[in-house]
Amino acid sequence: MGLQLEPSFVQEAEHRPEPTISDAGAIPLVDLSSPPPTLIADIEAACRDWGFFQVVSHGVPLELLEGVQSMAKEFFSLPLEEKKRVQRDEENPVGYYDTERTQEVRDWKEVFDFTVKETFHIPVTEEDGRVRWREVRNQWPEHPPGMREACKEYRKAMEDLSFRLLELIALTLKLPPNRFNEFFKDTTSFIRLNHYPPCPSPDLALGVGRHKDAGALTVLAQDDVEGLDVKRKSDGKWVRVKPIPNSYIINIGDMVQVWSNDKYESPEHRVSVNSEKERFSIPFFFNPAYYTNIKPLDDLITEENPARYDEFNWGEFFMGRSNSNFKKLGVENTQIHHFKKKV
Ligand code: OGA
Ligand code: NI
C-alpha cells in the first residue's frame, strides 16, 4: 500500500476518526457458562442496548484460533505476487484482495476471504434481468502449507458457536430455539482474514469505514491490538472495544434486525488503524442460504407490532450490499432501510 497515503484512502472530514473516543463504556460481557435464565437475560439486554457484546467461556479451543492466526500472519507476509495468485476477480468473489472500499473510500487493509462450503452459489443478473445462480469455489494458497486445514477446523467451531448464539437469540425473542436453523442449511457464511498494516496517516484513513454487517450474526476474533469502534446506541458516540484474551466479539447483522422486526438493530461500527502496530482480525459472517427470502418473522407480528419490512431475497441483497471492487462506483450500496415499508 506504500508509505504515502493515496487520496483514495482519505475519509471525508466528518467520517475521520476523532482523536477523542469515549472509552468509558465497554460493550457488554457475556459469560456463556452462566445458567440459562441469566444467560438469556444478559443476551437480551446486550442485543437490545448495544447489538454488540463480548463472549467468554465459549468452548472454542484456543489452539484452533491460534492456528488460524499464525497461518494468516504467514500468508500476509508473502510477497504480493504470491498472494495475487489467489486474488479474487470478476468471476470469483472470494480470495485475496487489498482494494476494498466502504462507502467509496478505500480501506487500509488486505484481506483473504473463504466460504464455509467449499463450493457455493452466487446470483448473477443476466442481461434480460433474470437471476441465474453460478457455482464458485474457494481459492486456497499453496503457502503456508496447512492453511486450508487450519481454516476448516476453525470454521466448524465458528459455525457451532453461531448456531448456539442464534438459538439463544431465538429464546430471547420467545421463539423455539431452532426457529432460525432452517435458513442456514445451505449457508453462505464466510470467514475473512483481515490484516491492517501500520498506517502513516491514521487520522485520515480507516481500516474499515463505518458500516453495518449484512448477515445474521458476526463472530469476530481480534488480536491484542485495539482498533474496533462501535457506535453506541444511547448517544451515538464511538466506543473503542478493548481486547479481552480468548474472547469473541459478537454483533447483530441486518438479517436479525429484519427477522426481529427492529427489536434488535444492526449496529454501526468501523476499524481505526494506528501508525505503529499492525493488527489482525478474523470475522466469521454467519449468513443464510442465498435463496432465503427475508421478512419479519410472522410469529412476532401483531396488530400493535406490524411488519416493518417488505420481503426480499438474501442473495440479491448481499450481492448488492457487498463492497466489491468490481461494483460500479457512484452507486449507493443496497442498505436494509431500502426495504422498510412506507408508512
Ligand atoms: C468487518 C469488521 C472488524 C475488525 O470486517 O466487517 O467490522 O475488527 N471488522 O476487523
Ligand atoms: Ni463489520
Image: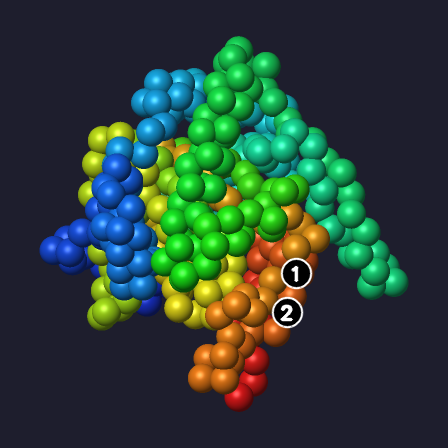
Mark 2 secondary-structure assignment: loop
Q: Which mark is residue 311?
A: 2
Q: Quadrant of residue 125?
A: bottom right
**Distance CA(mark 2)–CA(mark 1):** 6 Å
Nearer to me, 282 or 50 = 50
Q: Are marks 2 and 1 in contact (CB under 8 Å)?
A: yes
Q: Which residue shows up at 50% across the image and 44% down it?
A: 286
In the image, 165: left or right of 97?
left
Q: Position of residue 172 (x, y in %)?
A: 36, 58
Quadrant where the image shows the N terminus:
top left
Query: Which of these two is toward me, 324 or 320?
Result: 320
Mark earlier in primary sequence (2, 1) = 1
**x, y percentage for residue 181?**
55, 47
Instruction: Say if residue 321 shows up in the picture.
Output: yes
Q: Residue furthest right?
A: 128
What amino acid type should be assigned to the residue bearing mark 2?
Answer: Glu
Residue receiving disc 1: 293
- Could you tell me which residue is drawn at 56 percent across and 85 percent down? 342
Residue occupying image coordinates x 60% and y 62%? 294
Task: Give the residue type that dot 1 points to.
Answer: Asn
Instruction: State whether residue 7 is above or below residue 295.
Output: above
> What residue sits 50% from the left and 84% below the top?
303
Task: Assess disc 1: are there few (<14), some (14-19) or many (≥20) residues with their C-alpha within 10 Å of its C-alpha.
Answer: some
